[in-house]
Amino acid sequence: MPLNYLIKPSVETKFYIDYEWWDQSRDDLQIYLLTHLTPDQKKALEHADLGEVFDFVDPATGEVFQMNALGLAIRESAKRDDFITGQIGLIDSVFRALLVKGNDPLNAVELAQLTGRNAATILKTIGGVRIYRGIRPHLPNDGMEG
């Protein structure tokens, strides 16, 4: 178990989505990710084999990633101007902000800029002992990949 729970996060503490948390959670990441798609995207994925993985080339970097149809749909959604709005909950906003930034660790101030929410409120919500949707503090050597 990471020692993150021993650290009191500050506004400089960076957070990320811990996908290993999802592996151990009773929640299903795939189902949760589907909630972040538009109705049209959900409909397009109805008959897709989400287990099928293919190579995706990042047009900006040329880097090749393994991705399924859901991952590609999330990537496309994250580019939309209305992906993060004031009409969604705080945790969903933070999760989406991390998706937009490719899960690069972000602090409460950076998350506030992306979500339009108050940095102190973000920190108070995700900086506690409870881990929401796999969002947890990033320690430089905690084994985070990506």
Image: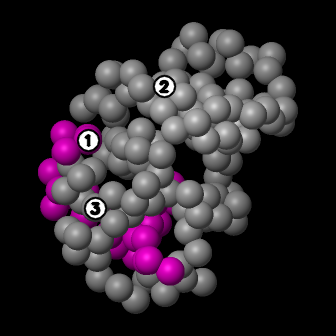
Residue 106: x and y in percent read 33, 58
In the image, residue 78 lies in the stretch drawn in magenta: no
Magenta stretch?
A: 113-141
Residue 127 falls inside the magenta stretch: yes
x and y percent of residue 120 in the render?
16, 61
Residue closer to the observer: 70 or 127: 70
The Cα atoms of the two marked residues, 1 and 2, are separated by 15 Å
Residue 5: x and y in percent read: 43, 83
Could you tell which of marks 1 and 2 lies nearer the N-terminus? 2
Q: Can residue 62 be seen in this view?
A: yes
| Callout 3 crowding tier (Cα within 10 Å): few <14, some 14–19, many ≥20 | many
Q: Mark 1 points at which residue?
A: 114
Residue 25 visible? The answer is: no
Residue found 58% across the figure and 75% down from its top: 143
The residue pinned by badge 2 equals: 77
Q: Is residue 21 left or right of residue 110?
A: right
Residue type pointed to by label 1: Leu
The answer to which image quadrant residue 58 occupies is top right
Looking at this rendering, what residue extends furthest in the front direction? 62
x 83%, y 26%: residue: 49
| Frontmost residue, 10 versus 126 | 10
Q: In this view, does 93 lie above or below 127?
A: above
Give the class, few, some or many, for how many residues have Cα within 10 Å of label 2's Cα (few <14, many ≥20). Answer: many
Q: Is mark 2 on a helix, strand or loop?
A: helix
> Label 3 belongs to which residue?
107
Residue sitting at 29 percent across and 29 percent down? 85
- Secondary structure under the numbered disc 1 in the rendered image: helix
Q: Residue type at mark 3?
A: Asn
Mark 3 residue element: strand
